[in-house]
Amino acid sequence: MAKHCNFVQKNPKRGTKQPNLNHHIDGAIEGAHCTLEVARMLEGEIWGQGFPQPLFCDNFAVESQRVVGERHLKLRLVKDGRRYEAMRFGALEPLPEKVRAAYRLAVSEFNGLRTIQLNVEHFE
């Protein structure tokens, strides 16, 4: 069921929290549906203005995080005992130990191996 999720972000100039834009969230996705097959299906669709790619929201534990390519965070997130590889592109701010994240499912290809990846767009 679709819902709106209001994320709050820090104002970098004042160090205070301020409401971020409301983001249309398609809800949580069950682990059984968080698969490479579903990510491939979503990437194969045509998305655009007025019809964005699904954005999911869930709570995770952050198992690890490190900077890659000088501008991105590579993450390992855990939910219900399952580990997920994730990326936060264009952001270096470390995530807290527990996080509510808005993300898109993606296919990551490295050395010919395709795996599922969560691309984190917002967190709190």
Image (cartoon, rainbow, N blue to C red):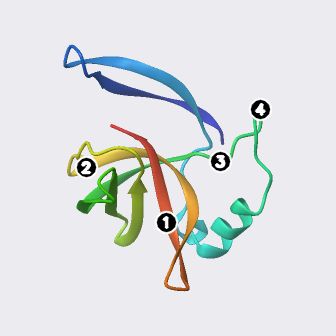
Q: Earlier in the sequence, mark 2 or mark 4?
A: 4
Give the answer, above or below, for where 97 lies relative to 84.
Answer: above
Mark 2 or mark 1: whose residue is earlier in sequence? 2
Calculate the distance from the C-alpha at mark 2 to the C-alpha at mark 3: 23 Å
| Residue 20 left/right relative to 75 | right
**Label 3 packing within 10 angstroms: few (<14), some (14-19), many (20+):** some
Q: Which tag, 1 or 4, sits closer to the chain's start?
A: 4
Earlier-in-chain disc, 2 versus 3: 3
Secondary structure type for disc 4:
loop
* Point 54% across, 50% down: residue: 28
Answer with left or right where residue 55 lies relative to residue 65.
right
Task: Provide the residue designation for mark 4.
Answer: 50
Disc 1, SS:
strand
Residue hosting label 2: 98
Q: Which residue is mark 1?
A: 117
Which amino acid lies under the numbered mark 1 shown in the image of this protein?
A: Gln
Nearer the observer, disc 2 or disc 3? 3
User: Crowding near pointer 1: few (<14 within 10 Å), some, many (20+)?
Assistant: many
Secondary structure at numbered mark 3: loop
Of the numbered discs in the image, which one, if any, rests on residue 63?
none
What amino acid does circle 2 point to?
Answer: Lys
Q: Gap in Å between the C-alphas at discs 3 and 4?
A: 12 Å
Q: CA distance from mark 1 to mark 4?
A: 24 Å
Find residue 16 and report its image quarter.
top left
Query: Which residue is farthest top?
Result: 14
Question: Which residue is at a point 38% across and 72% down the rendered structure image?
Answer: 82
Q: Amino acid at mark 3?
A: Pro
Labels 3, 1: front one: 1
